[in-house]
Every structure is written in C-alpha cells, then in structure tokens.
Image (cartoon, rainbow, N blue to C red):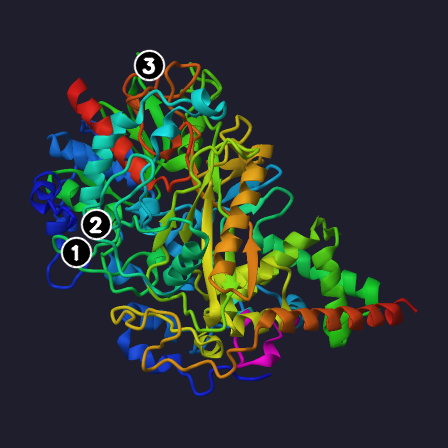
Amino acid sequence: MAPVNRPRSVRDRNESAWLLPKDGRRCDPALVEGMRRFADDDVVDLVVVGCGAGGGVLTQRLARRGWRVVCLDAGPFWDPDRDWVSDEKGSHHIYWTDPRVIGGSDPVPLGSNNSGRGVGGGTVHYAGYTPRFHPSDFNTRTADGVGQDWPISYGDLRPYYEAMEEELPVAGQSWPWGDPHRYPQSPHPVGPNGQIVMRGAEQLGIDVRVGPVAIVNGGFGHRPHCIYRGFCLQGCKVNAKASTLVTHVPDALARGAEIRPDSMVTRIELDDAGRAAGVVYIREGVERFQRAAAVAVAGYAIETPRLLLNSATKRFPDGLCNNEDLVGRYVMVQGAPQVTGRFEEEVRMYKAPPPEVSSEQFYETDPTKDYARGFSIQTVSPLPITHAEHVAAEGHWGSVLREYMRDYVHWSTIGVLCELLPLPDNRVTLADEKDRFGLPVAHFDYSQCDNDRKLIEASEKVAVSILEAAGAQETLSIQRYAHLVGGARMGATPSEGVVDSNLRSFAVPNLYITDGSVLPTQGSANPALTIMALAARAADHLAASR
Amino acid sequence: MQQRFPGYDVMSQAREWDPVTQAVVQARLGPRPALAFFTPPEEAVARPLMNRLLELDEGPAVPVLEGIDQRLATGQLDGYRQVGMPPAPEMWRRSLVALDEASRERCGREFALLDRDCQLLVLEGVRTGGDFGGMPGPEVFAAWLRFGCTELYSHPDIWNEIGFGGPAYPRGYKATSPGIREPWERADVAPAEDPVPIGARMEQARKRHLDGVAARAAK
C-alpha cells in the first residue's frame, strides 16, 4: 500500500517546513531577526529553558495557542549555511562542552556523544533515528520486575507519536514491532553500510527494516530531499534531517514566540507563595531576570537536574523539587556497543546517512534468557576520526593503527542500543568545581548492574553474527554508550517522581519539566521522538489548564 | 609502506564543497600560528611522543602537535573529565613531565633523547601500567591518542592515504553500494591486505622486539 501523505493537515498545525526559504538558503534571517521580543519585566505566560527536542516542541505548541512564550537557550541561534560544516573535527562547536565531571565504575563520556548546544539542542547532532517506544516500556516493573512503571500508558502517547511522525516527517518501512504502524514517508534507498547489514541479517533470519529516520524523502514543504552525504551527526546542512531548528522553531517564531539565544539560565526563582516567578539568566555577561507566569525546564538529563540543584532555597535546601531526594537520580544511558567488520570489497560506509536500517526483534524480554528487557540493532557509519577510536579501543597505536586506518574503505559498522536499567545511584550531583558563570558543574556517576552487563554481552554477539553472516573477514567491537535520559523522572506520586504524568512538578505547581529527564525507563529506542511526543502532550495539558 | 590509493587527491573536489566547509578544510593545509600552549621543554617531549603514537614519518607531514596546541590554547576541548583526571590542559602538562620521568627511570634519558625502541617501550609501559604522574596511565595514553587521531584523520592528505571521500555538500554521493565508486574516487590497489593478520604480526614482532629492548635496558 502506498504511504499516506497528509501534508495539508500537518501544515495546518505546524507550518515550519513552509516557512523556510525556497531559494536554497537554509534559514530565513527575516523570520529570526523579525521575531517578537519581550522585555525581562514582561510577565510572559511561559518561559522555557532550553530549545532542544522538548523545549522546541513545547514553545511551538503554546505559541500556536496564543501564549506569550520566551524560550531561552544557552547556545547560538544556528544558521546551517553559515555555522555548520561537512566535517568531523570542524563540528566541535555544536556539542555542549562546558566542564563536567564523570565517575562511577562505568563513567559515561559526554560532549559530542550525547550533548547538544544551541537552538535545536541534541536534535542538531543526533543521527535522526526516531522509533517509538513499545507498549511494554510503560510497565516494565509490573511485567518484567525491573525498572519502573510509567504513570501513563502507550495509548496516552500514541496520538502524539503520530503527530510528530508527520511533522518531522519520518521515513521508513511499515513497522512490525511494538504497536505496529506505518510511516508518512517511504523508506530511503539503502547505502553501502545498510546493504551489508541487511545481507547479514537475511542470512540469519533476523528481521530488519529500513528506517525509521526523520530525514526527508522526496521533499516536505520547502525542505529538500536528502543528498546522502553522510554527515548527519555534524548538523544537516541540507535541512533534510529533522531538528527542532527546522521542524518547530520557524512556526514558533511566526506565531509570536521569542527564542532568545546565548542566554544561560542559572537559577529558577520562587515567589513568597512558593510559585515559580521566573528565571535568572546571563546574556552577554549581564545577569538578568525573565519574569513568567510558568516555567518549563528542558535542559536534558544533566543540565535539568543541575539547574534544579543549583536553585536551592530555604524551602528546598537540597535543590528545587528535591524534597523526596529524586532530583538527579535514575539517569540512564543505553549500552551501545558497536561492531565493525572487514570486507574485501570496498564498502565506503561514509556514503549515505549513518541511520539506515534497524531491527527491534530483540526489544522485549525473552523468558529463555537470563536477563530482562532487550536491545535494538541499528546501522551506524563512523567517519574517519571515530573509526580511529574503534581501532584505538582494540589497543592499537603507532604503525598498526596507521595500517588499520589505510583500510578504512573496507569496513562496515553496526550498533546496538541496550535498555540499561534505571538505578538510584546513577545520578547527577554538584561538583566543587565551578564553570565560567561561577556555577557548580555537574558530577555524573554511572555504574552498570548485572542485568546491564549480560544484555550488552548478548547484544554484541548478535551484532558480530550479523556482520559475519554478511561475509566479514574480521570484526572489532567497541564498548560505548548512547543517549541520556532520566534525572527528574515522572511518577504517579511525589515519592515516585519529580513530575506528574503531565510533567508538572509535584513541589511547585507552575513548574514543568519537559525533556528527556522525565523518562522513568528508556527502552532500547532512541529517545528523541518520545521526548517530543511528551512535550506536545504536556502542551495540551498546559493549554487546557489555563 | 604501500600506498593504497595512489594518485587520489580529495582536494581536487574542493570546488564542489560549500564555502564554509572549504574554508575549514583549506585552513588545515595553510600556515599555522606559532605554538601558544606548549612551552619549548614541553614541545621537546610532545613532538616525539606524537611521532611514536601515530608514526608520523610513515606518511605525508601533518602538523599534529600544532593542531593539539591550538585546541588547548583556545579551549576547544571535550569539557567533561573523569574523576582522577585533571582538565585537559593540566593533563597535558603533567603527563609530559611524567613521560620524561618514566623515560629516565626505564631507559636512563629524557624521552626525546631515546631511540625509537626505547620510546616504544616507555609508551607501552604507560598504556598498560598504573599510576602515571598521579593519573591513571591507560587513561592518559587514550587521551593522547584521541587528541592525535583528531588531528591526523581530519587532514586532507591523510584522507588521500585512507581513500576517504571527504566533505560532500552540496554535491552528495551517487555511488552508494558496496564495490562501486564515484568517478573521482580511486580504487584500493591492495584490497586483500586485511589489516587484522598484518596488524597481529606487527604487534607480535613489536612485543618480541620490545622484550629484547627491555632486557637490554634492565642491564
């Protein structure tokens, strides 16, 4: 059956793709420069902290409802033409690289791996995989005895998943896993790396599908078709890959929101009645205070807890909303080992987007295994610097490293995402060290549990077997992590969560958290689409409550 | 060392790239500012360190140390650091002092004055050892290598060495299946040269050789 295209209805609720220039430029300076501006003393309806996946969607949704919204972002307002390059090393500035300390028995590298900077946030540098969570993700405690049940079900999010898939839009084959569904755009042609992985999976009888990727196939509004240049993780210069910079920010601006870049929020202020009064932020070296009737924090799993902890008051001496000692706890990353295999034919995996094909065949708990929950499989295509890290991780250096790297065009790479479990001691706290704003930096401890280790080991074996079945002469594995969620989880009660099912904090009635930090569990799906769906749902709640 | 892609010149495609990317890549081929971070005594250790870590004499000259210096001087760093590791600038200064100390202890002279064999021996000691200047040796070794690889594998001359197609906007790619190439790409002339057995033989030879060097150094 032909994929269903419903651009008309999408445009009716989000005009972003039609507000971008038609003339080949990737950003409309008139829209950015001409945006509505609010004064610090204006009591806006909502101030949003951070313009990534969650903050970008929330800002657009409420601007559409006529709310007066200011969204503050610590980084720049990107112009893809001017600010981004088709180059690995030259993309350092799109990552959040402020000082942070990592610890625990399995410390998680940050920076380019999982931390975005500027308007668009992490969606600027994510690969673009946008799977849904499975229905089973919402009650793992009850069904599998691990993790935590969500205070909402899959059905509560489904309409928002569907809306987001249309707005990004998502391209892929019809999806057989979780809640089976189709995608608004047809699957992309598969490049060399994806073809190898499909070949191996077919040999083993593993079901893989093309997608789901938030990359335009054929055209969408004024956003062009993907050109298969392979630099998705360096920021899409084509405007083909969805980031909130192109999918929600243009519509937000056209509907009267202000997105104020280069504004680092340092504190949330409460009034005498215990309600949020606005946020303190630093712009061009000057400390300012934006007044607001409500505050939404969307700084992601490290910066959101850090901001709450840095906003301690007399009433909340251990950090805002931290009266139950939950802020900063249960931060999760996915175990994401990658396996790279050598083929005598030239693969040249740098061509085509790294996100191409995936499988969720191993997503659910398999009662025959000695671990709970599962993993997904996805193609990845490291560029040379990242491929060198794979080689170095094997212990190679000097002449041997050079020899491996001269062979770069012969390697194909596959990644997995493992659902690691939420643990209370995997947490963000404040370090003694301070950043250039004088604020204590985040200290992020991470340690795996037994279930995590078993799952990672099993997933890596499957990835190796796929490449071997495809004809790999050799394989190398690297242990790594992907994504960051949790740290301000949602729960049914204040002792279970920092926020309720509508993302409103239990402790401060007009304070919301609308980013990945609210996730109680993470599945083995990339989190972006779920974060966007949750933010859109919270926007409906906010609009209805006024 | 055999060239795998003789005659390949990725810069012949630069006119197909957007001007911002062109400028960023071209700058790697042009003049570099004088060192700003490393002091002369530090430079004296860091240069031979990078030569050994990446065997820079094996291919075209790449200003690896200059690139690292620029990143450290301008703060273009990863930001995060592991407990037990200082921020990157301090890690570099302390590790270079520690490298000279380890060299004197193991082989009797500063790192820069050692022959290649002894340099390899000392570095293998850092990579597989414990405390190194108050820091975990393997972490320091990994950080050195990460900084070095970022410079080496972002250089167009090295893209020629490895056959990488380089930037591709706005042109994109057309030949996107295994075994085929764009008209301007060059075929690997030695596709059967699987680096895994070759690398294993090299590692074994290095280990045997270094065991001999270590035995002599101990006398």
Taking the view exactly as shown, the residue that stands out farthest to the right is: B219
**Residue A324 visible within the image:** yes
Identify residue type, mark 2. Answer: Val
Label 1 sits on a secondary structure element that is loop
- Indicate the secondary structure of the residue bearing disc 2: helix
Q: Mark 2 points at which residue?
A: A246
- The residue marked by circle 1 belongs to what chain? A
Real-space Cα distance between discs 3 and 1? 45 Å
- Asked which secondary structure carries label 3, the reply is loop
Residue A175 image offset from top left, x and y in percent: 29, 43
Q: Give the range drawn in magenta.
A: B52-64
Q: Residue at coordinates 33% horizontally, 19% vertically from top-left?
A: A500
Mark 1 touches mark 2? (CB < 8 Å): yes
- Residue drawn 57% across and 33% down? A370
Question: Disc 3: which chain?
Answer: A
Dot label at residue B81: none
Q: Position of residue A115 (x, y in %)?
A: 41, 45
Whether the residues at callouts 3 and 1 have beta carbons within 8 Å, the answer is no
Q: In the rendered view, does A451 fall on the left or right side of A524? A: right
Residue occupying the point 31% across, 36% down: A530
- Name the kind of residue labelled 3 in the image: Gly
Where is mark 3, residue-wise?
A: A274
